[in-house]
């Protein structure tokens, strides 16, 4: 086996210099030819370049608008799917929470509504009863009133006295034995 020749940086530099020189000469030759043939060839090249540029811009704009439309369509589809999925998950979550609360003994929304109706009905009944009581007190005041506050207290005590035939000692013994005497 033969060894490859050792790397020589000068050889590489010479080759690069020679290639650059050839490129330079080709450019100078093209420039010279363009000058010789005059501005007509140059104008033709410029016009051809403009024509190609316009065509490529039109194609690029068309492709860009198509790509933009596709991307916006895909984004809209993804957005719609996401909203639908989130709505579905939200509904499932709410249903499961409601079922868990019902299992724990919490009232349903319908139970709360029924309770609210009952409370309103009780409030209305209470308001009616308090109005009737106020009207009854007003009628009693306009009728006969006790002459003194002491007489009013005696009247109240008499109405709260124990029932006849049952003494306090009889009731106390009934409580201690657990029997009721009549």
Image (tube, grey):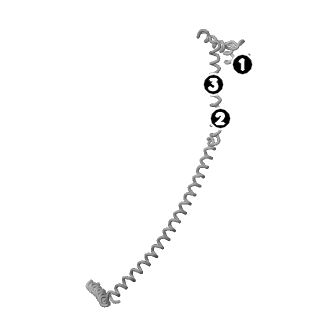
The picture quadrant where one finds residue 84 is: bottom right
Q: Which secondary structure lies at badge 3?
A: helix
Whole-angstrom CA distance, mark 3 to mark 1, is 40 Å
- Near-viewer residue (39 or 167): 39
Q: Residue at x 64, y 16 (%)?
A: 140
Q: Are marks 1 and 2 in contact (CB under 8 Å)?
A: no
The picture quadrant where one finds residue 124 is: top right
- Near-viewer residue (129 or 115): 129
Quadrant location of the N terminus?
A: bottom left
Q: Are marks 3 and 1 in contact (CB under 8 Å)?
A: no
Task: Name the mark on residue 180.
Answer: 1
Q: Which secondary structure lies at badge 1?
A: loop
Give coordinates of residue 114: x percent, y percent. 65, 38
Quadrant location of the C terminus?
A: top right
> Which residue was labeled with disc 3?
131
Task: Name the mark on residue 118.
Answer: 2
- Is 3 placed above or below 115 here? below
- Is 181 placed above or below 32 here? above
Task: Name the mark on residue 127.
Answer: none
Q: Residues within 10 Å of mark 1 (few under 14, many from 20)?
A: few
The picture quadrant where one finds residue 134 is: top right
Q: How many marks?
A: 3
Q: Earlier in the sequence, mark 1 or mark 2?
A: 2
Give coordinates of residue 30: x percent, y percent. 31, 88
Give coordinates of residue 172: x percent, y percent. 66, 15
**37 to the left or right of 62:** left
- Near-viewer residue (174 or 119): 119
Whole-angstrom CA distance, mark 1 to mark 2, is 38 Å
């Amino acid at each position: 086996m033969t060894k490859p020749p050792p790397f020589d940086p000068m050889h590489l530099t010479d080759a690069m210099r020679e290639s650059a020189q050839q490129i330079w000469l080709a450019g100078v030759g093209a420039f010279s030819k363009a000058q010789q043939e005059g501005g007509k060839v140059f104008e033709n090249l410029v016009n051809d370049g403009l024509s190609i540029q316009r065509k490529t811009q039109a194609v690029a704009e068309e492709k860009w608008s198509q790509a933009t439309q596709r991307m916006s369509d895909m984004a809209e589809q993804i957005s719609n799917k996401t909203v639908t999925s989130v709505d579905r998950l939200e509904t499932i979550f709410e249903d499961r929470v409601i079922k868990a609360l019902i299992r724990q003994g919490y009232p349903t929304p319908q139970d709360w509504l029924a309770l609210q109706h009952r409370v309103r009905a009780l409030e209305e009944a209470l308001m009616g009863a308090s109005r009737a009581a106020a009207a009854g007190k007003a009628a009693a005041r306009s009728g006969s009133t006790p002459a003194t506050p002491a007489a009013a207290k005696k009247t109240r005590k008499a109405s709260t006295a124990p029932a006849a035939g049952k003494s306090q000692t009889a009731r106390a013994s009934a409580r201690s034995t657990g029997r009721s005497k009549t």
